[in-house]
Amino acid sequence: HRRWVLASRPHGEPVKDNFRLEEGDIPTPGSGQLLLRTVYLSLDPYMRGRMSDAPSYSPPVEIGATMVGGTVSRVEQSNLDGFKPGDWVLSYGGWQNYEISDGQGLVKLGDNPEHPSWALGILGMPGFTAYMGLLDIGQPKAGETLVVAAATGPVGATVGQIGKIKGCRVVGIAGGSEKCRYAVDTLGFDECLDHRADDFAEQLAQACPQGIDVYYENVGGKVFDAVLPLLNTAARVPVCGLVSGYNATDLPAGPDRLPLLMGTILKKRIRMQGFIIGQDYGHRIGEFQQAMGQWISEGLIKYREQITDGLEQAPEAFFGLLKGKNFGKVVIRVGSD
Ligand code: NDP
């Protein structure tokens, strides 16, 4: 049994010493319990928040505890009715290769799921986040301009593609020309801009000649600074994530942008709303699964993963995710199918 535990809390960017790999015997399930073997582990930006003990919507991982995370696993031993060895399940087993479960919260993935790891991405939490944040809060209408950053990640790529299904002009923002090309050529975005370009704010203004009606906020920081003056009257801003600031230790350099933000929200009657997918929309997962299943079967949604082999690689892959070194949904293959 191998597991990554949180060894210390990061200050700024997380580093290898914040984690410790512990090894021990494979645990034995008691009565009413299952032994699950992890096949895939999802790495997601929110995990940076769990490493910190600052107040948040979920409690932090305790020092010495296994890092949390969504997992796709197979039942290895079952002492629980309704589960048999070999069953595929979606769990929340964390950064480890075996887990004891009492069955609570497990989702069965069927006998032979075609793409088991997709339950961690396009068919799971990130896809659901894109769907609800865009459709319920963003309320995109045909002909409107939708802007989304982290445009090739599992949330952003899905937001933009649903935006196209709904008839929007979709402008993506991503790190680097390769990602931008993919957003246009493969995902079907109308344009995609590199946020690292010196003239990024001017490029964005040019790409949005009619202004911005929906800004799906994934990153914050410089990208939001460029978006704010372009927001139209009655624009909607689902606030999904602020990944550019997850490692921040200080406020950004001045001037203070808060009065500009508040003035813009007021004068342009902008609706800006944060959400936490599970807590706000858990009850609507069925609607999402049906719509997404349909779109995928019709070939309307493309999905890209970045799969890395080996549980020992999890910290490095996680650091890369926070810096945009990933290209697609970050998944660790912990064990064989
Ligand atoms: P991604 O795979 O898109 O990874 C994050 C991406 O953010 C990086 O690949 C990088 O892409 C981009 N990024 C990192 N730093 C910066 C920066 N300084 N400026 C601009 N872009 C940056 O992750 P997800 O799709 O899983 O998540 C996207 C967002 O959604 C995150 O903010 C996450 O926290 C949030 N989220 C919120 C949920 C909720 O319930 N509210 C649920 C799930 C996710 P690039 O190289 O293209 O810049």
Image: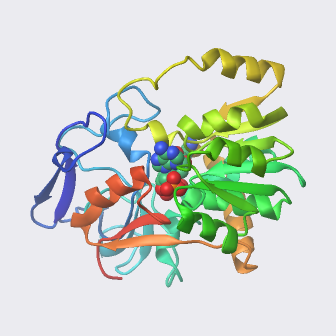
Does residue 44 appear left or right of residue 296 in this picture?
left
Residue at x 83%, y 25% (from the top left corner): 268
Residue at x 40%, y 50% (from the top left corner): 322
Farthest residue toward the left?
A: 24
- Residue 128 seen in the current view: no
Total residue callouts: 0
Residue 233 % position (x, y):
86, 31
> Is the C terminus in the top left, top right, bottom left or bottom right quadrant?
bottom left
Q: Quadrant of residue 248?
A: top left
State the residue in front, 72 or 295: 295
- Residue 151 seen in the current view: yes
State the residue in front, 83 or 278: 278
Residue at x 33%, y 60% (from the top left corner): 317
State the residue in front, 332 or 153: 153
Q: In the image, is residue 150 above or below residue 112?
A: above
Residue 274 % position (x, y):
62, 34
Q: Quadrant of residue 184?
A: bottom right
- Identify the colour scheme used: rainbow
Does residue 40 appear left or right of residue 76 in this picture?
right
Does residue 141 appear left or right of residue 307 in this picture?
right
Does residue 20 appear left or right of residue 215 in this picture?
left
> Is the N terminus in the top left, top right, bottom left or bottom right quadrant?
bottom left
Residue 45 % position (x, y):
44, 48
Q: In the image, is residue 308 above or below residue 315?
A: below
Farthest residue toward the front?
A: 198
Residue at x 62%, y 33% (from the top left corner): 225
